[in-house]
Image: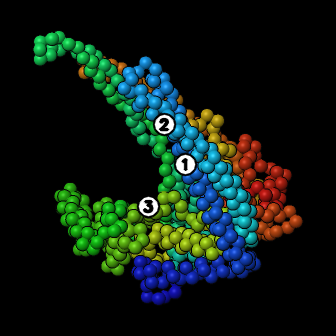
Amino acid sequence: MINNGLEYDPIDYYKGVLRQEFKDNAQEFFQGIAKESKVDKEENLVLAKEVRKQKALMDDAKKNYKSAKAWRNFFLVLGILGIIAFFAGFIVYFGMEIEILELLLGLTIGGVALAVTGFCVAFIVFNKKVKEYATAHDGYAKKYTEVYNKASAQLIPLKELFNFKNFIKVVNKTNGGFTIDEELKQEKLLMMANNYDYKIGFRDDTTVLDVISGNIEKNPFIRVLLYNKRMYNHTYTGTLTISWNVTYTDSEGHVRTRVESETLVAHYTAPAPRYYNEGVLIYGNEAAPDLSFSRAPSGLKIDHTEKDAKKLAEKRYKKMEDIAEKMISKGKSLQPITNPMFEGLFYSLNRDHEAQYRLLFTPLAQQNMIELMTNTEFYGDDFYLRKAKKLNYVYTQHATFSITFRYTSFYQYYDYNMLEKDYLEAMCEAYQSLYFDLCPLLAIPLYQMSEPSVFDPVEHFQNVSGYEAESFINHMDSDLFKHKDTDTQQILKAKYVNSVGKSDVYEVTSYSFQKIKHIEYIQKMGGDGCLHNVPVVWYEYIPLTQINNVAIAKIEDSDDKKDENYNSGLELTRYKNFAGRFLGEDTLDSSSNDEFVKAIRNRYNFIK
């Protein structure tokens, strides 16, 4: 890290240095690959201007077409109303009294005039316009498609240089105090397990959608996007409308009967699956190794004022002091630091080692945390932080759906300027998201000053780490793994089987459910004094499993060179440095693996 006086003040460091530094590095990188691509920017901008022109003409034609069609339909309705008026007047004319015959005669004549006018204007004027605008729209649409395809294709040499490494290169060039890896290797997972007691596997109802890894100084972190399935009690609702006769005497003494009705509502509760994303950053550090605690977002709104923050902090600090007194009477220890702003917003009640807690949260760390929790420019106080001895877990709301830079989203662009602008903005947003996941850790100076114990990698045979393999499998066609009877989403779990050369075989288990419809009848008392069976439709979820094998291999730099078999085209994208082959129930032997590796070298069988 370059010493600039802000290394231990992460918010000001980001605002004053890193944000602009990363943006400059990203701009320099983009200009570098643009130059390498030899794309003619000026020619593309001319084409892009023509694309926008044809798009505007096409949209105008479509708008005029819709307007003309609406007017045509309006006059058609008038014509139909005229015909109805004519026949109504004509039929009613016979048998009517003499004094209203003139009115009916006028209605009949008016109906004829309205029908003639409506149909003439609809078919002669607007039907012609509808056809004209439809023809014009089709012409502009054809021209738009032609020029769009030409402009987009002209940028392909540049788009082909987009890959997952772009973001990594720019991040690692920026002096943020952390670096990220091209892939999460099995050695790092083993280091996390050995040095920090990390339990590598996730539950069977959790799968890894995406993963990146890196280091803060020399201490490792893993950032994963998880897809979870949890069971919860879902309440179904059913209704039944009943009616009954009621006899009563009115005010005049007559006995009468009326019908009354009521809608009965019943509920039935049964287990059902719920699926959701979750982003988590896992960090290992040996500082304060006996301390465990957790904290959750304070609830401070992103648009809060300084007065709001102070009021909330003081209220929660007072509550913390009351809790501390009660804990002492029960033989437990909670000693609030005399900093109401920090303790009130951070609000960790379950810490279990006060000395190490204070060692970690020095006055500088407290101030950094306050700045992070009260910032209104970025994500605000959206982070959960849990420390379990040597492991730290950071959960943020902004990392719920994506944790990596999505370079493939730019493949459809046709305008060089727009491509550059949006590409750089997306890259900066991805960096900011990563930085503020790390920020609760960067806010603690002791973490940055601590180095990990020496770790000698344990011998292993995997070419691809389990997290990367599972993430890669989740980028494959999900229909490959689904049970034929499944009615829900699926959780894919990958288990390492063996290696054949540079390929790893993983057993993939798909967990899902079949929905079985049931009707439960719940008795409810009605207003008629009788019990009624109210039907409630509910679903039983039957667990399903399906097992298949997948081969995954790394794509080496030497395999990524263009040769006579090179298939150009952006449809051949990939997930990081891996390629996969669906094996089903088959295994992988040397001959089939040679065929697979050959396919990789020909840039075939890539999975996005």
Read off the residue under disc 3: 397
Measuring from the top left, give residue 59's x and y in whole percent. 61, 60
Q: Amino acid at mark 1?
A: Trp
Q: Quadrant of the C terminus?
A: bottom right
Residue 188 visible to the viewer: no
Quadrant of res 576? bottom right
Q: Amino acid at mark 3?
A: Gln
Q: Amino acid at mark 2?
A: Gly
> Taking 19 as reference, is 458 above or below it?
above
Label 2 or label 1, whichever comes before in sequence order: 1
- Asked if the residue under mark 1 is in contact with the one under mark 2, i.e. CB atoms within 8 Å, the reply is no
Viewer-proximal residue among 60 and 112 = 112
Report the mark closest to the observer, 1 or 3.
Answer: 1
Residue under the point 59% across and 56% down: 64
Mark 1 secondary-structure assignment: helix
Residue under the point 50% across and 79% down: 19
Viewer-proximal residue among 515 and 158 = 158
Mark 3 secondary-structure assignment: helix
127 left or right, relative to 606: left
Crowding at dot 1, Cα within 10 Å, few <14 / some 14-19 / many 20+, comes out as some
